[in-house]
Amino acid sequence: MEFMLDTINIEKIRYYQSILPLSGVTSNPSIIKKERKIDLFAHFKEIKQLIGKASLHVQVVGETAEEILADAQVIMDHLGKDIFIKVPVNEPGLAAIKQLKAKGVNVTATAIYSEMQGYLAIAAGADYVAPYYNRMENLNIDAVAIIKALAMEIERTQSQTKILAASFKNVAQVNQACRQGAHSITASPDIFAQVFGMPSIHRAVTDFKKDWEETFGVKDVKALEESEQ
Ligand code: G3P
């Protein structure tokens, strides 16, 4: 399973980079807007340096296939050929994905709300397909069934495409995406904070610590070793 962060906040990436088995960082224009007006490419270069070999996914904004290809070129000129170009799967987007893949560019096909969009992006050779879990649920679209169908299609065709499930509002949605066969998920730092924020985890750790201290009278294993010398 690959875990990615759906943010470009440097502090959050630095914090979780040291904790998570981090496979990548994903972004889109709405995520960029949250950081207000930044020096875009300098900011992404800083993220690249922070995350090392993990992948960085940057979205195009062009509306025609030509504009999308031009955006992709500018992004690669600034950030390198190892960047993943995020392209929404509409008609111009799919046309651009075909051309980008013909040139060997890394592509993340995004804004996926339906099975058919996913099937087409897989057939076009996208490296990742990003179904929007919560947004589908909000539209009464069965996100579970769609991720399962895409996983089956990838298996059936022995495709190299990976499902990068996105758009999560809670941990239960992430769990469902994993169960249905998503190879990767991208989630905001808040979702990862929810995973570790369970009061029961804190309680267990506090109880273990208390029992340890009551048994040995020192705070940790190192202190125990020192007290025995
Ligand atoms: O990566 C795509 C994702 O950011 C969309 O999420 O929260 O805007 O539905 P959201």
Image (tube, helix red, strand yellow):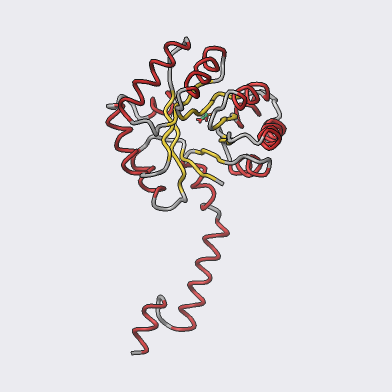
From the image, which quarter does the C terminus lie in? bottom left
Q: Is residue 3 left or right of residue 176?
A: left
User: Where residue 155 sits: x, y (%)?
Assistant: 68, 37
Residue 19 to residue 3: above or below? below
| Identity of the residue drawn at 66% across and 23% down | 114
| Identity of the residue drawn at 34% across and 38% down | 47
Seen from this angle, which residue lies furthest bottom? 229
Number of callouts: 0
Q: Nearer the viewer, residue 106 or 41?
A: 106
Residue 200 to residue 219: above or below? above
User: Where residue 24 sits: x, y (%)?
Assistant: 45, 40
Residue 28 to residue 20: above or below? above
Q: Nearer the viewer, residue 18 or 104?
A: 104
Residue 70 to residue 180: above or below? above
| Identity of the residue drawn at 58% across and 34% down | 161
User: Where residue 222 sits: x, y (%)?
Assistant: 37, 78
User: Where residue 193 sits: x, y (%)?
Assistant: 49, 47
Q: Is residue 180 left or right of residue 6?
A: right
Q: Is residue 207 left or right of residue 179?
A: left
Q: Nearer the viewer, residue 47 or 96?
A: 96
